[in-house]
Image: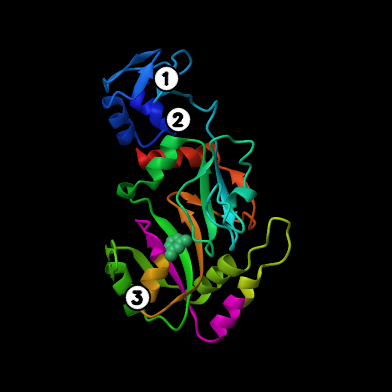
Amino acid sequence: MRLQKFLARAGVASRRACETFIVEGRVSVNGSVVTELGAKVDPSRDVVKVDGKRVELAAENVTIMLHKPAGYTTTMSDPHAKRTVAELVPADKLAGLFPVGRLDTDTTGLLLFTTDGELGNALMHPKRHVVKTYIALVEGQMEDSVAKRLSRGIELSDGMTLPAEVRVARGPEARMCAALIGQGKDASGRAKRHDGKRSRAVLEKGGTYVIVGLREGRNRQVRRMMEAVGHPVIALHRESLGPVTLGDLPRGAWRELSSEEVDALRKLIG
Ligand code: URA
C-alpha cells in the first residue's frame, strides 16, 4: 500500500495533507525518514511514524449510523456541551470513531461515524459534493417559486450556494415528511418527542415541509437559506447522505452499516 494511502486510512489527515507530511520529512518507515511519495509500506510488518509517533491501521474499520435526536452536540468530547453524540454511540469499544461532518444541536436524523479516516475525510471533503437530503419544517406557506429560487442558488454571507434540489412537499409527501421529522420513537420505543407536537402546532398555523438536497455542507446552511427567503426553520432532519438512508432506525439508536452500504459510499468517493 502506498505510504500516503496508509496514513490517510489510519486517520492522520486527508491523503493530500499526508502527502505534504511526507514531503516535509515528518514520516519515517522502520526508522528511516521517507520523503518519496511513491514509497510502499506493508501495514502488517512496517513501523510507520509521523513526528515520531507510531501510526497503525485499526484492525478492521467500522462505520455506523446514528439517528441523532435534538439536543445533542456533534462532538466526541466537549466539557461545555450539555449532551454529546458520543454518549449515544459505542465510542469506548470502537477506538478512533469520529463523526462524519456535523449536524446542529437542534437537527435530528442521519449522522455517520467511522473509524476509517480515509472514508470519513473523503466524505466530508467539500469538493466531493456528496448529496445530503434534509426535510425542513419552515414557518409560513412557501411558494413553489421560492423553492425554485433556492434551488438555483442564493446569496448568503459566505457567497452563492450551489444549485440544489429544493421542493415543497404536498399531500402524501408532506404527511411522510411529518412522520419522518416529528414522529420518531426513541431508542427505548417511547412515544415521540416534544418536537412532534411543536411541528403539528406550526403546521396548524400554516407551516410548510420542504425537501432539500444539498451538494455542499456549509455551517447551518439549510437554516440560513430558509431564513434568507423569509421562512425560518422550525425543525430540521437529515434523512440521507449519498446512498445511505436512515430508514426506520429509532431516534437515539445506532447500527453498523452493511458491507453493501460501505461499498456504495466507497464507490461514491472513488
Ligand atoms: N444545515 C443546517 O442548517 N443545519 C444542519 O444541522 C445541517 C444542515
Asked which secondary structure carries label 3, the reply is: helix
Measuring 68% from the left and 60% from the top, which residue is drawn there? 186
| Residue 239, x across and y down, in percent | 50, 58
Measuring 41% from the left and 79% from the top, which residue is drawn there? 231
Residue closer to the observer: 67 or 12: 12
Quadrant of the image containing the N terminus: top left
| Contact (Cβ within 8 Å) of mark 3 with mark 1 | no
Measuring 44% from the left and 83% from the top, which residue is drawn there? 141
Whether residue 204 appears in magenta in the rendering, the answer is yes
Residue closer to the observer: 119 or 70: 70
Which amino acid type corresponds to the residue marked 1 in the rendered image? Val
Measuring 33% from the left and 78% from the top, which residue is drawn there? 146
Residue beneath disc 2: 10
| Residue 6, x across and y down, in percent | 40, 25
Which amino acid type corresponds to the residue marked 3 in the rendered image? Ala
| Residue 202, x across and y down, in percent | 55, 81
